[in-house]
Amino acid sequence: MIIFSQTMKVYVIIVVTLLVLLTCGEKEEMVARVGSKIIFSEELQNRADFTPEYRYRGPESGRAAYLLELIINEKLAALAAESLKLDTTATIRNLTTFIEEMALARELYRKKIQSRVRIPKKQIDLAVQQQAQTRVIAYLAFRDEAMAKQYRQRLAEGLSFADAMREIYGLAVDTSGNRREIRWGYNDQAIEEAVFALQRGEVSEIVSVAGAYMVMVLEDIKIDPIVTHSELARRKSYAHRVLRARQEAQWSDDYIRQLAKDKRLQFNKPLIKLLADYLAEKTIMDTGEKEFPQLKFRPLADAIYRDANDYLYNHLQVPMVTFTGGSLSLEEILRRWRAYNFPVDLRSRQACASSIVRSIGLMVRDELLAREARRMGLGNSPRVQNEIRMWKDYYLCTLWFHHQKEMASQADKSIKPQLMLLRKMHPVTVDSMVLKKVEPSPIPLLALRVGQYNGLVVPPFTYFD
């Protein structure tokens, strides 16, 4: 079975354009060769940073080799897809344009932001101290800020957490369900800052995360002392990576705001609302909660695009957004959305409309960043070209997998035999010395971004079972 979904695949495109490639060295070292394709150590590190991997259960010292094996299989499948001319399909052509914008945006970040970030030693030392603690919290999460304030006040005045849970969820509630362990560098930054400021038994201020309002009580502190020099070095290295990621995230947002201001970015808000309301109405009407009870995000159906074109026919050439040197019409926005297949939020009509407006903003932002990167002559950067190849190989792999499944008989759906054959056709070599230098974290750095959690960081690695 391949762990892959269209919704997850597309969400990475939305999320990843916010990010900066981390821990990039100037020298590219080849960690493996798969036929005509080369895997650089930077690619292996970046895939580990971008992508959650839940199956690995071995020692951390073996994680890099395990992830490399997954990428090798991916490259083999990409070679097979190219031999079948799947790289010429409309799907790949459309995605390649989007992948290029992602890569250009990150190269721009590297030039404008990443090179400026400096992390003071005292911040790293504090982070190392905090890594030696695991803080156990009980928490309540609310959509209503007023209710969050009410329970925060009552907890501070002495209401027990168990009683608060029973009031909210009923007498039979399992109060252990709202407890978790907080380790530094593995959670939303706002949560960590609030938790590490608490003493045992104290109640946090209200923390707003991903649309929810959290109130936390610190129940216990577990100490995990540093016992070896290698462990100290590992924690310092991890602290540096996390702190860089968080600083870059903040500066990236600031840079985008300034760029939009400099380019005199203007949105046609009435037209955006008209489009968002129509698409949300059609989407919720066509899907409904009962049909997709477990699916919160899903791309729009093809028929909805056709309906939107018909309904808004007289508005198609109207600019939806304008900026210095260009504009995007409603027709262009719909064309791009259909090509990239953005997912929408199915939880409610309002949530759906909000996700549509957000996606339009992301498309516009990506366009501005890509234009600015091209203006600076970054399109031919080796890192840009390497990243385009990396993600193109991933999508070729998924196309080949689905092609093989369609061609296989009902009696034999396994892909492993084809994969074994590909290994014979395309020799694989690994440089073990370069591999030892790669130290992927078990938690992808994308999950450290404000408002992001592991479940939203995609696409997953490809598995052939």
Image (spheres, rainbow, N blue to C red):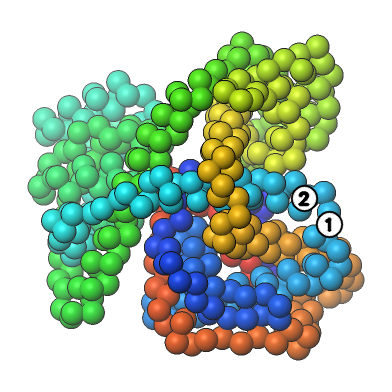
Q: What element carries label 1?
A: helix
Establish if 341 lies above or below 242.
Answer: above
In the figure, 32 relative to 77: above or below? below
Q: Label 2 amino acid?
A: Arg
Relative to residue 128, is residue 451 depicted above or below? above
Q: In which quarter of the image is residue 400?
A: bottom right
Residue 127 % position (x, y): 20, 58
Q: Which of 119 and 13 is in front in this view?
A: 119
Residue 26 seen from this side: yes
Relative to 231, 455 lies left or right: right
Choose the circle earlier in sequence order: 1 or 2: 1
CB-based contact (under 8 Å), mark 1 and mark 2: yes
Residue 262 image position (x, y, % from top left): 46, 25
Query: Which residue sits at x=52%, y=86%?
Result: 431
User: Tag 2: Cα neighbours inside 10 Å, few (<14), some, or many (≥20)?
Assistant: some
- Of residue 370 and residue 43, the one placed in the foreground of this image is 370
Image coords of residue 125 (percent x, y): 15, 60
Quadrant for the N terminus, please: bottom right
Name the residue type under label 1.
Thr
- Residue bearing the label numbered 2: 93
Label 2: which secondary element: helix
Q: Residues within 10 Å of mark 1 (few under 14, many from 20)?
A: few
**Mark 1 highlights which residue?**
88
Q: How many labels does the image show?
A: 2
Which residue is found at the position 27% from the left and 72% from the top? 234
